[in-house]
Every structure is written in structure tokens, then in C-alpha cells.
Image (spheres, helix red, strand yellow):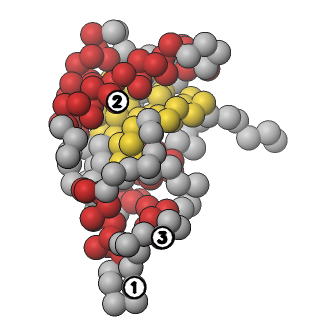
């Protein structure tokens, strides 16, 4: 099992690497919103928060209510509404589902997925899990939520920390 400090150290390294990428439109972004995953809370971002604050970023950790995806997206939107300028959204695990939906905000300049679900807009975490067959794919007698809970807590994720520069749709 991965040590939580090691995990978030790698997350902060991913953020550092992202900030160093030449040509990424996030060079002028000083606001970073961190979104936690399932079965944890915002305190898991503490070490990353401290490192980013030390580098003069304005960092907000959003505490998700975990009542529904819509409520979680609304919580992130409230965090986005208080930012002054462009924002980088960072999500871990289930937080990837949330930042994908909240990332349509025009102030969001990029999305960072740290060992996170990377769904298409409108695709749920359950849909994403169901798209990959495994020994844990639910049968008709199993609840998809059981598989989702298992995956969130013990699954070795196939997704690395990934950085996406948000592209504006052409009108």
C-alpha cells in the first residue's frame, strides 16, 4: 500500500513539473484549487498546500460534501467563485470526476489529475470503471457502488498524474 505522504509528495512533484512545462498557458496562474478524492477529506492535501503556499501560489482546498456529484461540483464552483484571476484545478481519485465537470468554468485554465479518474464530461466514475473489465466488474447481483468503493480504496490506478491545458471551444 502506498504511504499517503509519498503519494502527495509525488502529487506536489507533478504540480511542480507542470509549472515548469514551457508553453503551457498556466504560467500566469497563481490560483490553485485542490479537490480531494473519496473516503478522505481535504486535509490530505496539507503537505501539497504548504509547498505551494511557500512558492507564493494562492491555494484553496475544497471540502466536498460527498452527497452527490452535483453537490461536489457546486462546492468546487463556490471555491472557483472566490478566486481572483485564472485557476488551475487539481483533483485526486474521485476528485477527477468533479474537476472534469467544474472545469468548464471560463476561469479554469487547466486541469491536473493526480492518480485520478479522467472521465469525459458527463461520464460518471461508475461508467469509467465499467468500461474496463476486471475481476471486480459487477454482475447483475452486485452493486456498482461496491465496485466503486473497492476501486477508490485499494485499486492500483492505471492513470499517472496528468496535466491538461484547457482548450477553448471554437465558436
Identify which residue, 35 or 31, lies in the foreground: 35
Task: Mark 2 vs mark 1: give the one in front.
Answer: 1
x 60%, y 30%: residue: 165
Could you say whether the residue bearing mark 2 is in a helix, strand or loop?
Answer: helix
Task: Mark 3 vs mark 2: give the one in front.
Answer: 3
Asked whether the viewer can see residue 81, the reply is no
x 74%, y 41%: residue: 169
Q: Position of residue 6 (x, y in %)?
A: 23, 30
Identify whether 53 is placed above or below 34: above
Question: Is residue 71 toward the left or the right of residue 167 in the image?
Answer: left
x 33%, y 24%: residue: 12
Q: Farthest residue in the top direction?
A: 55
Could you say whether the residue bearing mark 1 is in a helix, strand or loop?
Answer: loop
Question: Is residue 149 toward the left or the right of residue 89 in the image?
Answer: left
Could you say whether the residue bearing mark 3 is in a helix, strand or loop?
Answer: loop
Identify whether 24 is placed above or below 4: above
Q: Earlier in the sequence, mark 3 or mark 1?
A: 3
Q: Pointer 2 and pointer 1: residues touching (CB < 8 Å)?
A: no
Q: Pointer 3 and pointer 2: residues touching (CB < 8 Å)?
A: no
How far is disc 3 from disc 2 in space, using C-alphas?
27 Å
Residue holding disc 2: 11
Q: Residues within 10 Å of mark 1 (few under 14, many from 20)?
A: few
Q: Position of residue 53 (x, y in %)?
A: 28, 15
Residue 139 bears which disc, if any? 1
Residue 133 bears which disc, if any? 3
Q: Quadrant of the C terminus?
A: top right
How far is disc 3 from disc 1 in space, using C-alphas?
11 Å
Identify whether 139 is placed above or below 97: below
Q: Earlier in the sequence, mark 2 or mark 1?
A: 2
Asked whether the viewer can see residue 51, the reply is yes
How far is disc 2 from disc 1 in space, using C-alphas?
34 Å
Question: Is residue 80 toward the left or the right of residue 104 in the image?
Answer: left
Amino acid at each position: 500500500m502506498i504511504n499517503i505522504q509519498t503519494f502527495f509528495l509525488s502529487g506536489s512533484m507533478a504540480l511542480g513539473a507542470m509549472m515548469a512545462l514551457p508553453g503551457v498557458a498556466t504560467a500566469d496562474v497563481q490560483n490553485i484549487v485542490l479537490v480531494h478524492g473519496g473516503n478522505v477529506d481535504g486535509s490530505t492535501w496539507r503537505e501539497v498546500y504548504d509547498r505551494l503556499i511557500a512558492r507564493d501560489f494562492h491555494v484553496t482546498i475544497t471540502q466536498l460534501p460527498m452527497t452527490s456529484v452535483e453537490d461536489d461540483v457546486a462546492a468546487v464552483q463556490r471555491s472557483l467563485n472566490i478566486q481572483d484571476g485564472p485557476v488551475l484545478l487539481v483533483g485526486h481519485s474521485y476528485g477527477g470526476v468533479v474537476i472534469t465537470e467544474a472545469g468548464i468554468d471560463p476561469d479554469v485554465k487547466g486541469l491536473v489529475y493526480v492518480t485520478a479518474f479522467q472521465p469525459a464530461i458527463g461520464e460518471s466514475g461508475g461508467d469509467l470503471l465499467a468500461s474496463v473489465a476486471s475481476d471486480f466488474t459487477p454482475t447483475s447481483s452486485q452493486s456498482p457502488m461496491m465496485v466503486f468503493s473497492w476501486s477508490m480504496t485499494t485499486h492500483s490506478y492505471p492513470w499517472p498524474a496528468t496535466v491538461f491545458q484547457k482548450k477553448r471551444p471554437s465558436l
